[in-house]
Image (cartoon, grey):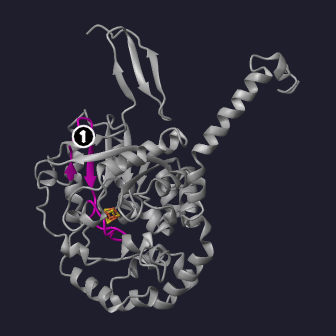
Amino acid sequence: MNSDQAQKFVPVEKSPLHVTEEQRLIGIERCESYAASIQDYLEARKNIPAGLDLADDYADGRKRVLAALGGTGEDWQDWKWHVGNTITDLNTLGKIIDLNDDEREQIRSIESVCRWGISPFYASLMDRTDRDCPIRKQAVPSGLEVENRTDEPDKMVVTYNSPAPLVTRVYPDRMIINVTNACTMFCRHCLRRRDIGHENIVYAQKDLELALDYVREHPEIRDVLITGGDAFCVSDERLDWLLTELGKIPHVEMKRLGSRTPVVLPMRVTDELCDMLARHAPVYLNTQVNHPKEITEELRTATDKLIRAGVILGNQAVLLRGINADRHVMKKLMQDCLRVAIRPYYIFNCKKLNGIDHFRASIEDGLNIMEYLRGYTSGMAVPTYICTLPKSRGKTPVMPQYLLNINADGKARFRSWQGFVVDYDDAKPQAE
Ligand code: SF4
């Protein structure tokens, strides 16, 4: 007997799901109102550039970048070629995108202040002529970075939260080990700009040993994030060693990696890297995708390999004015992340930092976007919106208010995602 034969098939009209004709009509009407509530998005979505639809444009970009760098199709598949050919000079950049004299001058003005570097892969996604291209805005320096250099850095973040070399700890049961300050490209909005410095550093083995000693000596630490910079900027061997050492510590339950490399240089996600990560499964990896244009077939290939290796993927987007601080763009971004198996995890409000003020959107702008996500798309596509408070007071969630009040008579009153005010019978609070 197969499993179908074991089932008793019941027509729906004889089941608990049966509804009358009148009830069906009401259901149809309600569903039409749901569909109508996202018509604006369905229209707007058609005009949002999305990487999964841009393979032809990206192929042109690839040809342009290879020609500018003198590379081959074989080079393109080799992540070490990309790292060795990171674009850091105006002459090369000018062969890939149009740059006028003013833009060239702005980029020169940045160089004494903060370095810049674009992976050839990421450069191939840039629109040649459109100065508002969201990829270009994240990669190419702007004179506003100099104009906005006014604020003192938040010294608390580093100075008072490092109980051991390379360790950052601001929470009870989790901490960071910083392995490098290098990244496969330098994002213009980087919230860790201060750590990026002027040259790449991979931190010394003896300091990593001291960081591991700190984990061993603190049994309350159950979750360790390896990041930088970018965790995938260290060798497979070093990552393997670190994950192995962490795996030997009985109280470490979670090993996490922070890397934007799957987005900006997906070729780094090699079979060898994935084989190594599979030996340490489950590993959690949070990446950073900020616009649907960044979700490419190459990223899809990388995430496919990572999930087969037991890596659990999340996205930590940054809310960026002129890039994704728009309710339709953000919804498309969250939906497209799920298409490539990346679960939206956080949206960070862009902190007040030196040189990035022009990227900042207000807390209210972010709340309006969250309001537009919740209920209007899958819960899986709704991340937590976070303000990272100054003086190391931590990541703090901000969300639209749905609970209006709880009365003494045990009634709670809510505002639904559609704006209906609804009473709800609450349970009695537990005694202390
Ligand atoms: S990859 Fe992350 S740490 Fe590196 S520059 Fe970009 S945002 Fe900053």
Q: Can residue 244 be seen here?
A: no
Principal SS element in the magenta part? loop
Residue 77: image x %, image y %? Answer: 54, 75
Q: Quadrant of residue 410?
A: top left
- Identify which residue is drawn at 47% across, 30% down: 416
Residue 38: image x %, image y %? Answer: 58, 47
Callout 1 crowding tier (Cα within 10 Å): few <14, some 14–19, many ≥20: some
Image quadrant occupied by the N terminus: top right
> Image height check: is 326 above or below 3?
below
> Image height check: is 219 above or below 207?
above
- Identify which residue is drawn at 53% across, 42% down: 376
| 142 horizontally vs 275: left or right | left
* Range shown magenta: 167-191
Q: Is residue 50 magenta?
A: no
How many marks are shown on the rendered structure? 1
Residue 353: image x %, image y %? Answer: 20, 61
| 95 horizontally vs 103: left or right | right
Task: Ligand 1: give its quadrant.
Answer: bottom left
| 261 horizontally vs 110: left or right | right
Image quadrant occupied by the C terminus: top left
Q: Nearer the viewer, residue 172 or 194?
A: 194
Q: Is residue 169 magenta?
A: yes
Q: Which residue is mark 1?
A: 216
> Image height check: is 90 above or below 30?
below
Q: Nearer the viewer, residue 421 or 163?
A: 421
Q: Quadrant of residue 54?
A: bottom right
Element type where label 1 sits in the image: helix
Q: Amino acid at mark 1?
A: Arg
Q: Nearer the viewer, residue 401 or 122?
A: 401
Q: Nearer the viewer, residue 295 or 211?
A: 295
Residue 257: image x %, image y %? Answer: 38, 52
Q: Can residue 285 be seen here?
A: yes
